[in-house]
Amino acid sequence: MRKIEHLGIAVRDIEKSKLLFSKLLGNESYKTESVESEGVKTEFFMIGESKIELLEATKEDSPIAKYLEKKSEGIHHIAFAVDSIEEEVKRLKSEGFEVLNEVPKRGADNKLVVFLHPKSTNGVLIELCQDVP
Ligand code: CO
């Protein structure tokens, strides 16, 4: 793993949260992107070398909608940048981690992403991301 690429934060109202995080960070969001397949709308902020990703559900049955139903707004996942997502998946599987999607999915911000099940990572949803070649 190279670094923490971003922290994902689940929010109910992304427009309100966008304003809140602009004030908090003293910095505008640099990208708004919807990922239709995941039923999610995202806002990205740059902070130093890392990013903050705000996530709002766009469908009732999206993973973020379910998360907000069960829990509340807050940190949803930690994303690590990796050079080779395939190699990391192999390595982590051999170490006993549970991979949620073995075939990398197209995520927001031009990334290929794989998630690890929180039950194998102390309750923290982990995202691995690699730049789309
Ligand atoms: Co993410």
Image (spheres, rainbow, N blue to C red):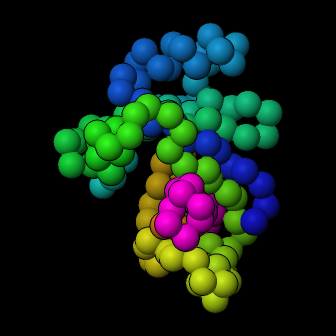
10 falls in the magenta region = no
Side (left or right) of 63 relative to 33: left
Side (left or right) of 133 relative to 60: right
Provide residue 86's location: percent of width, then percent of height: 60, 80
* The N terminus: image quadrant: bottom right
| Image height of 130 relative to 33, above or below | below
Side (left or right) of 19 relative to 66: right
Residue sitting farthest toward the left: 60
Q: Nearer the viewer, residue 94 or 113?
A: 94
132 falls in the magenta region = yes
Provide residue 92's location: percent of width, then percent of height: 64, 79
Q: Nearer the viewer, residue 29 or 17?
A: 17
Magenta extent:
118-133
Residue 133 in sight here: yes
| Image height of 106 relative to 46, above or below | below
Q: Quadrant of residue 91?
A: bottom right
| Image height of 50 relative to 132, above or below | above
* The C terminus: image quadrant: bottom right
Side (left or right) of 128 relative to 15: right
Q: Quadrant of residue 88?
A: bottom right
| Image height of 27 relative to 1, above or below | above
Q: Quadrant of residue 34?
A: top left
Q: Residue at x 48, y 48 (%)?
A: 108
Q: How many marks?
A: 0
Provide residue 122's location: percent of width, then percent of height: 59, 61
Residue 131 in sight here: no
Q: Residue at x 80, y 33 (%)?
A: 48
